[in-house]
Amino acid sequence: KVFDRVREDCPNFHEKIKPINAELTQPKLAISAEDEEELLTRVNIVFHCAATVRFDEPLKHALQLNVMGTQRLLELARQMQNLEAFIHISTAYANCVRKCIEEIIYPPPAEPKKLFDLVEWLDESIIQDITPKLLGEWPNTYTYTKALSEYLIQQEKGNLNIAIIRPSIVGASWHEPFPGWIDNFNGTSGIFIAAGKGILRTVIANNEAVADMIPVDVAINLTLAAGWYTAVHRPKNLLVYNCTTGGVNPFFWGEMELLKQTLKKWFSLFRWHLVSAIQTVCGRPSYSGQISFSPLTLLLCFRMMKIINRLHKSMTLLQYFSTQSWNWSSDNMNMLMSHLNTEDKKLYNFDVRQLHWSEYIESYCIGAKKYLLNEDMAGIPAAKQHLRKLRNIRYAFNTTLLVIIWRIFIARSQMARNIWYFVVSLCYKFLSYFRASSTLRH
């Protein structure tokens, strides 16, 4: 469905696309001689988007993909006869050890070439052991290797016209191909779904920290516009574009309360009897123990524990980013916007000042439901009715169980019997008083 509009506008669009086999971890990218010849003679612009985005990727593999793979692609790009621009996709968190991040290349956490030599001869188990020491202040191998790749590009760019795009947390689309489109569970997508399904009740976050999300189509529009500007204007220096929202249109983690009604509206929560809102707290992973006990949860206990463990791991990895804020400059982003004409500003819109977060979050939740969970939107009323029935059954079961336990306890204790009779008598008197009051009013 995502390509329906393309099929409509250009039915033969597939004829303009030629996939080739390549592998970032292999010498010369493992590209065949025939494909290499075509690339060297016909390519005008390179968008380098390939990377591992896993926070817990082993350091050796992350280096091979994110840094050495970039180096190999640069080697190929330098041989391209008609190349006009090379656009590299990094991350706004590549330099997350700094609170104020300018649109410049910062000194790397280590010399990339020395790390290449290190991982070549060291055993993987040893690399795993020394990874925390190598990472230093960087929270994970993803941000660490992205910082390395930026520095490597600056050092080995040669005469290439290069720009680097740094998107923050990439979320569902704002407008294109349609609002709320998303195709992965990364970033906040997994949080919204887990909360909407009732599995997640708590996010470890600082309410005053910025949840810097960027719609995927905004990041793409900026990337395309930067490709045009780099090829046409050929800046003397490598330009970096911080693609973020926090500086001009911030959305705070504390505003996740805004999510409460949206999640209730679009997610049925029929599998688990948990609250349907995200509660934001600082400092303790309370979500791991907030499962309501019922016959269903007891029967599926082992399966649920696996989900909870995975969720706990994901939330632990996210905690670094949800408990603090960064200030990103956006001078180059503003400069690029000023070079677009009125029509192009609409076509390649990356002006996030126009983004309304409440509308965006709602379309995000709808998109997650439709495109990730493949759920039928027409079934929401029936699902909610079914949820109410399940809740009523659970309440009835728990009440009956409580009464049975209490009756057994009463049979063995005189004090318990006295308390029980007192409570029943009090309830009876209250009901009698209520009925008498109602009669007097009429």
Image (cartoon, rainbow, N blue to C red):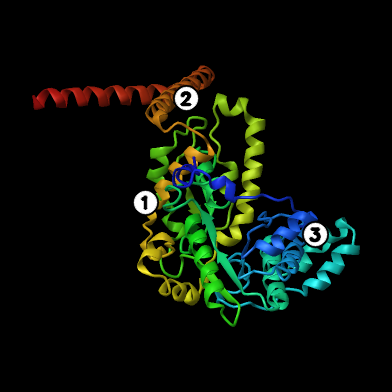
User: In terms of depth relative to the viewer, which is nearer, 63 or 50?
Assistant: 50
Which secondary structure, mark 3?
A: helix
Residue for point 67% across, 31% down: 302
* Amino acid type shown at disc 3: Lys
First reached walking from the N terminus: tag 3 or tag 2: 3
Residue 213 position, x and y percent, is 49, 59
CA–CA distance in space, label 3 to label 2: 50 Å
Q: Residues within 10 Å of mark 1 (few under 14, many from 20)?
A: few
Residue 367 position, x and y percent, is 46, 43
Residue annotated with mark 2: 394
Residue annotated with mark 1: 359
Q: Which image quadrant is residue 237 in?
A: bottom right
Nearer to us of marks 1 and 2 is 1
* Amino acid type shown at disc 1: Glu
First reached walking from the N terminus: tag 1 or tag 3: 3
Nearer to us of marks 3 and 2 is 3
Q: Residue furthest left?
A: 442
Residue 380 position, x and y percent, is 40, 31
* Amino acid type shown at disc 2: Arg
Which mark, by number, is residue 60? 3
User: In terms of depth relative to the viewer, which is nearer, 375 or 401?
Assistant: 375
